[in-house]
Amino acid sequence: MDSLITAAARALAAGDPFGALNRVALRDDAPALALRGIAMAQLGDFVRAKVLLRRAARAFGPKEAVARARCVVAEAEIALASRDLGWSAKALDAARVALERHGDRMNAAHARYLEVRRLLLIGRLDEAERALAGLDPAPLPSALRTAHELVVAGVAMRRLRTSAARAALGRAEHAARDAGIPALTAEVESAFRVLTTPAARLIARGEERPVLLEEVEALLASKALVVDACRHAVRDARTVVSLARRPVLFTLARALGEAWPGEVPRGTLVARAFRGKHADESHRARLRVEIGRLRTALRTLASVSATERGFALMPRRASQVVVLARPVEEEHAAVLAFLADGESWSSSALALALGASQRTVQRALDSLAAAGTVQSLGRARARRWMTPPVPGFTTTLLLPAPLPGD
């Protein structure tokens, strides 16, 4: 490898894409194409970066398996950064095996972290944790140790283990400082802000206030009965009753939880659950049926008592009833939760992350675009969607991952 390629590689490792391009921008040999692709990715031009890396992979000879594998890993990283979640996990795994077989343990570890980050992004926390358990960050360079701790912190935040998340971020901060790469330091600082930014709203006794992740963690471990509008469940410290597939029952439970210890008039329950303006006899009959179903569903947690004007929720073990709500509530909130990270997403990637059909996601995006909430860039397969982050709120609780007890 010549001196210019070596110098460009060192510049990229230090987070200096312009320094790398100054050395290889006019070259079209395979190593230069690969380095130019990585530099363009660091500068945010993902489309050009993919083209360059694919040209590099084709240009490397059949005996240069390690170089081709590195191109695959680099392209997978670009796909992750551009939220193209449909990239081939098999190709990345094959590249990782090739790198391990040829002794390139650092890039093999990098490939593993890319897959773990993808699993974390789409909410497959159990698989992410199992993959992390087989990785030892101690022998890795500072940049990869930072990546390891960021993933550990991300899993801990989604599991609502804030102490573990804070400890991992502390280690990530130390490793990022050793690496000396500004982009890594900024990523750690951004992750730290999640712990100090309101993650949800707490509604209790007619009052509402924002709460941090650690407050949510404490709330779910307390003696309170929580009507959880983030996961559409009713829970206390010991039992979780999911109503995610029973929206009418959850709407009734939330209305009763918000009014606790008071009652909710029948007309109000009809309006919220059935969207009826007037409670006629058919609405009242349906309300009685749904209240009976709610009593059955919540029998281990609470009873639903009839009053002269309506119904009231009576917890069995809990000392109080509270409602935990999303920081911002509107239609298509799950789609907005992903877009709120500030990155550009394809509709196919959103469909994969949400576990929904691409057509369903596209309809939601069209509706949000018509309302001016999101905007698109590009056309056809290159079309991407994005929106600015919700000011003052973290989206951790909006993402589709289980909370403790789910």
Image (cartoon, rainbow, N blue to C red):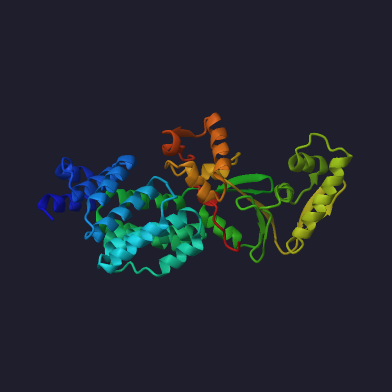
Give the image location of residue 97, x and y in percent: 33, 65
Task: Identify the residue shown where x is 27% and y is 44%.
Answer: 52
Q: Work out which quarter of the rendered image holds the C terminus and state it.
A: bottom right
Residue at 26% x, 46% y is 55
In the image, 18: left or right of 169? left
Q: On the rendered structure, is 31 left or right of 403?
A: left
Q: In this rendering, is residue 404 above or below 10?
A: below
Do we see residue 73 in this rendering?
Answer: yes
Asked whether 99 or 43 is in front, the reply is 99
Please name the residue shown 10% across and 52% down the image. 3
Residue 383 sits in which quadrant? top left
- Whether residue 125 sits left or right of residue 382 in the image: it is right
Nearest the eye: 79 or 140: 79
x, y (%) of residue 20? 19, 46
Residue most extreme to the front? 62
Looking at the image, is 174 positioned above or below residue 49?
A: below
Rendered location of residue 400, percent (x, y): 55, 52
Which residue is at a point 13% across and 56% down the rendered structure image?
Answer: 1
Q: Is residue 56 above or below residue 281?
A: below
Q: How many marks?
A: 0
| Any part of residue 211 in sight | no
Near-viewer residue (148 or 381): 381
Residue 82 picture location, percent across and down: 39, 45
Q: Quadrant of residue 99?
A: bottom left
